[in-house]
Image (cartoon, helix red, strand yellow):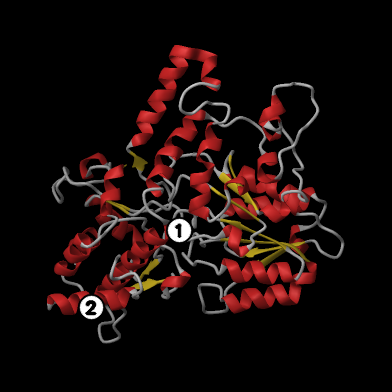
Amino acid sequence: MDPFDAMSPRKVLERVSTLLGCSQTSNEVATYLDNHDELKHLREQFLLPKVAELPPSDLTLVDGTKECIYFVGNSLGLQPKMAKKYIDEELDKWAKTGVHGHVQGSRPWAWAENNIEGLMANVVGAKPEEVALMNGLTVNLHILLLSFYKPTAKRHKILLEDKAFPSDHYAVESQIQLKGYDPKRSMLLMKPRPGEEVLRTEDILDTIEKEGDSIAVVLFSGVQYYTGQLFDMAAITKAGQKKGCYVGFDCAHAVGNAELKLHDWGVDFACWCSYKYVNSGAGGLAGAFIHEKNALTVKPALTGWWGHNLKTRFRMDNEMDLLPGISGFRLSNQPILLVCPLQASLEVFAMTSMAALRNKSRLLTGYLECLIQHYYNKDESQPHKPYVHIITPSHPEERGCQLSLSFSVPIAAIFQELEKRGVAVISGVATSCIKYYSASPHGLHQIFQFLL
């Protein structure tokens, strides 16, 4: 058992530095943490680009043969090593057996995604029958809202955060318009308090209590993409349902990042992409969830052949034998070449648990926070010294594995210097933020040697 499991990141760093007789920012601490990382072997399951393979790298400054430091798993996860093997297997089966691939082999195309939904359910804390792998995230959000958003003259609002991911904002806006309502009246957008950057849980719950009678759907992110805030999904769900609202979550930045318990929390519905922390590749197969309590009462507004019971699907009698719950929301067969990399990644998740991954994530995030605060805290006695402000909540339980940073100097120069040295960072989503997915403590320590 990991001796650090029950300790806060700061306590771990204090104990290790005391044990080693060095500063918390010493490279000895990073090396110690690496050596005692019970999950470090899982890095071997993924392909990390070499520094020389990243276009911005300056090989006069850094060794091009080394693996890059990858900070953009919140945009695109790394490729699982088994992904290519599985894709090649299906291409080979297609070449050799043609149409028989629909029902033959280790992943028959007619139900290949069904074979890995149990693995996905474990990642999101659900029962296998509550999860479907299908479509893309925004398509799934639309499909779910078509059934869960049933506005009335009294109850027509959708509550969401003001800086929701643009795709969510657009989906909600269009669903409201589709049902004949005005987004200006029916979109209830929550903003942080003046001078603050993240939403307070008590403010969310207070809004639900005050406005709940007019709210049809509460729709929040699991993890807010811009700030990195991990919302209290259990409390939001309880509060919304108490007021008679359906409660759903876009878990795009939470799945594979935070420990989710969608079933136990009683969440009505959720959806997510799988190409970020779940590493399924660009445009990978997305997921959707409907709680079993809604399986027989919430029906799909759109139906397709793949929502028909597999046992009777091929009778071709045009009499719908609708599968209950989220399975009935399927429209079409899923692309087998998208199933393959998702299977490869989910098999890696099955080698551990989300609880164990979360423990490592909390420590790794806390370690980076410690380094930033040590080297780049604002110092009033040195007004010209560059500093970094961390937007993401400081409490480990209120964030995932992301730190969003605001710099006192032009950010373009920071990005350029990091990219030159083989650090993959994100610059397009929010230019005041650097977010990271996974790196070793030694890798994090190395970044600060670059910049100091």
Q: Residue at x 26, y 50 (%)?
A: 41
Q: Amino acid at mark 2?
A: Arg
Q: Does 407 sit left or right of 159 as displayed?
A: left
Mark number, residue 430: 1
Rendered-image quadrant of the C terminus: bottom left
Q: Could you tell me if residue 388 is visible in this image?
A: yes
Residue 318 to residue 137: above or below: above
Q: Nearer the viewer, residue 140 or 194?
A: 140
Q: Which residue is mark 2?
A: 15
Badge 1, how many Cα within 10 Å: few under 14, some, many 20+? Answer: some
Query: Which residue is at 54% across, 67% downward?
Result: 231
| Image-based side of 6 in relation to 446, left or right | right
Q: Residues within 10 Å of mark 2 (few under 14, many from 20)?
A: some
Report the side of 372 relative to 427 (left or right).
Answer: left
Query: Looking at the rendering, which quadrant does residue 54 occupy?
Result: top left
Whether residue 385 appears in this view of the structure is no
Residue 191, labelled with which disc? Answer: none
Quadrant for the N terminus, please: bottom left
Kind of residue at badge 1:
Ala
Q: Foreground mark, 2 or 1?
A: 2
- Mark-to-mark CA distance, 2 and 1: 35 Å
